[in-house]
Image (cartoon, grey):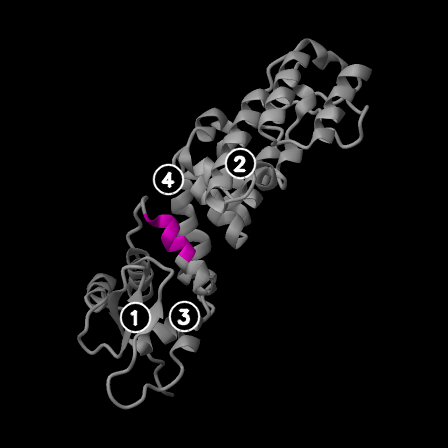
Amino acid sequence: METPGLVVHGEAAPFSTALRSLVNNPLYSDVRFVVGQERQEVFAHRCLLACRCNFFQRLLSSEPGPGVPSPVVLSTVPAEAFLAVLEFLYTNSAKLQRHSVLEVLTAAVEYGLEELREGHLGTAHLRFCSQLCLEFVVKALDVELVCEALQVAVTFGLGQLQERCVAFIEAHSQETLRTRGFLELSAPALLPLLRSDKLCVDEAELVLAARSWARVGAAVLERPVAEVAAPVVRELRLALLAPAELSALEEQNRREPLIPVEQIVEAWKCHALRRGDAARGTPCRRRRGTLPREHHRFLDLPFK
């Protein structure tokens, strides 16, 4: 009877080091990429990329013609992020940096590298997008990074990351509202925040933050403030404001339209009838950070 073979394993570190030396190395390279707005040239190896990732297998499936092949242009991914992705494909490890981790995550998703989630060869150790990168982002979250991370999560449908970002902002609401990242959120990314009952911020401050956000968007998009604010402004809970605050908001809204007049009228109805359900669709539920006001005792929907 033939003796069964024995699988032997050498040390992984020297193997990984040797492969890392090939990252962006023109030696034996048979494919070139032109990456990012800076158009940096990056060298790689077809067989390695193709066997590690379905995206590159499809991208590089055609045989190069005679002569020097044209480079593959990937203009939307920054060079640093692309090199981190290559490093992982070559060595199964990569050094992530806080300042660029979201760009690496974006590249992984945008170029189909989410297939490494479980590995297109069926090997769970190839997890990159959903575990390694996301875990790093979650650990690195702070008030300066969280809105950018939320935008990435909403753009690419990363539900787990979105939940973690929203939870972080709920716990650090006032600090986050003052960041540049908040002002640069898209309307779809802002919506889950304005719908949250757990924001630790008063409604008056949230209205001011929404106005600042809409002003920035109006300047960038060259559209009216009210038009930019339209997709999200309905989530503001105006009935939580005291009558004096609502009057001041109404006056400011005449000078700089932000909130539909009918939404302000609905809030006044709640005050007049002293019922939270007086006007259908008027959100009266208190948030975690809502400051108490005398009329709140008439609202039917306290914070839970």
Residue 304 appears in the picture as rendered: no
Image location of residue 21, percent across then percent down: 19, 66
> Is residue 101 inside the magenta stretch?
yes
Q: Disc number at residue 140?
A: 4
Give the magenta range.
100-106
Res 53 label: 3
> Which secondary structure, mark 4?
helix
**Could you give the CA–CA distance between mark 4 and mark 1, rounded to whole angstroms?**
30 Å
The residue sitting at 38% across, 78% down in the picture is 60
* Residue type of the residue flagged with mark 3: Cys
The three-letter amino acid code for the residue at tag 4 is Ala
* 263 and 63: which is toward the camera: 263
Q: Position of residue 18 (x, y in %)?
A: 19, 67
Please name the amino acid that badge 2 sits on. Answer: Ala
Return the disc, 2 or 4, that comes first in the chain's sequence: 4
- The residue depicted at 63 percent of the width and 25 percent of the height is 254
Residue denoted by label 1: 33
